[in-house]
Image: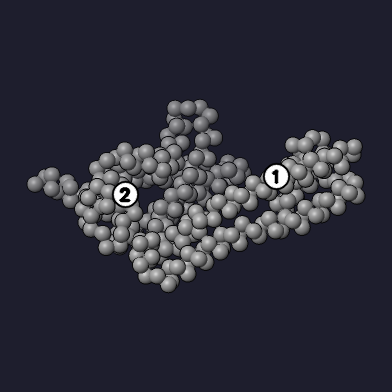
Amino acid sequence: MNINKQNNWKEKLHEIIYEADTPAGKLFDIILLLLIITSIILVMLESVTSFANQHLEFLDTAEWIITILFTIEYIARVIVVNQPKKYIFSFYGIVDFLSTIPKYLSFFILGSHSLIALRALRLMRVFRILKLARFVGESNNLMKALRASRAKIAVFVFFVLIICIILGAIMYIVESGQDSGFTSIPRSVYWAIVTLTTVGYGDIAPATALGQLISSIIMIIGYGVIAIPTGIVSVEYAKSTSTEENTTKNIQEDIHLNTQTCSNCHETDHDDDANFCKTCGNNLH
């Protein structure tokens, strides 16, 4: 009887923490999102020296409250799954741990204040919360477009890198006799990359007329460099969207609005009408 009650309690808590199909699960995700945003704001404010010195006690108290809440949440996530290691050593499990531990380290390690930057990792947890149904389809389409275009983008990036090396070497030859900052080929390649991407730090600038002409050409090419990868991904995204609209079968196979997480093996990618885990056969309830 006690075992059944314990299992029932764990199942209800698992549904609230890991799933967004129920009102309680959605409310939990919303509260968690607000805590994450609050925590990130505190981290940013703490980096402002004048504000941190004036409100040191408030920032410390608020961070302890948030850290304790996240600790309770982390422990609850470990308790409600049948195989805790699946969560602990998962990507989000590691992120949760690293974003919570810095505050506790301040008790044991001197100078650990610099580790507070790890708290910014909490922002990555937003991606887990955005598994809410209305975001899943669009995120799947975007991921499919990126995967489909990765080979083309890789070839394009490699080509751009070659162009930067060639242009950097040319600029080194043209500007090496001038006091313009082109002191080596690697430094000239750095200038070519900065110019081609239209960043333009201005720390190195050509002094000769030929060098300025070459830099002008590189700047014009830079607009194409920005546009081409965007166009590649856009075309693949349009193909993915078109296929989704025209084929109902593809929608059912590729886009799952089910946010249920298996309490046994921690599998998340289940079909919308699934009652059992496709990996271990556990009842999804």
User: In the rendered image, which residue does mark 1 sit on?
Assistant: 162
Task: Tell me how the rendering is colored.
Answer: one colour
* Residue nearer the viewer, 161 or 19: 161
For the image shown, how many numbered marks are present on the structure? Answer: 2
Locate residue 128 relative to residue 203 in the image: left or right: left
Q: Quote the CA–CA distance across marks 2 and 1.
A: 42 Å
Residue receiving disc 2: 267
Amino acid type, mark 1? Ile
Query: Which image quarter: residue 252?
Result: bottom left
Q: For the point 77% across and 37% down, which residue is it? A: 185
- Mark 1 is surrounded, within 10 Å at the Cα level, by few (under 14), some (14 to 19) or many (20 or more) other residues, namely few
Residue for point 34% across, 42% down: 87
Q: Residues within 10 Å of mark 2 (few under 14, many from 20)?
A: some
Q: Position of residue 81 (x, y in %)?
A: 27, 44
Where is residue 98? Give x, y as percent.
Answer: 44, 38
Residue 8, image x, y percentages: 18, 51
Q: How far from the left and from the top, in percent, is residue 35?
A: 43, 52
Does the rendering let one see residue 224?
yes
Tell which circle, 2 or 1, labels the residue nearer the N-terminal end: 1
Q: Is residue 149 left or right of residue 128?
A: right
Three-letter amino acid code of the residue under disc 2: Glu
Q: Secondary structure at mark 1?
A: helix
Q: Quadrant of the C terminus?
A: bottom left
Place residue 175 in its image quadrant: top right
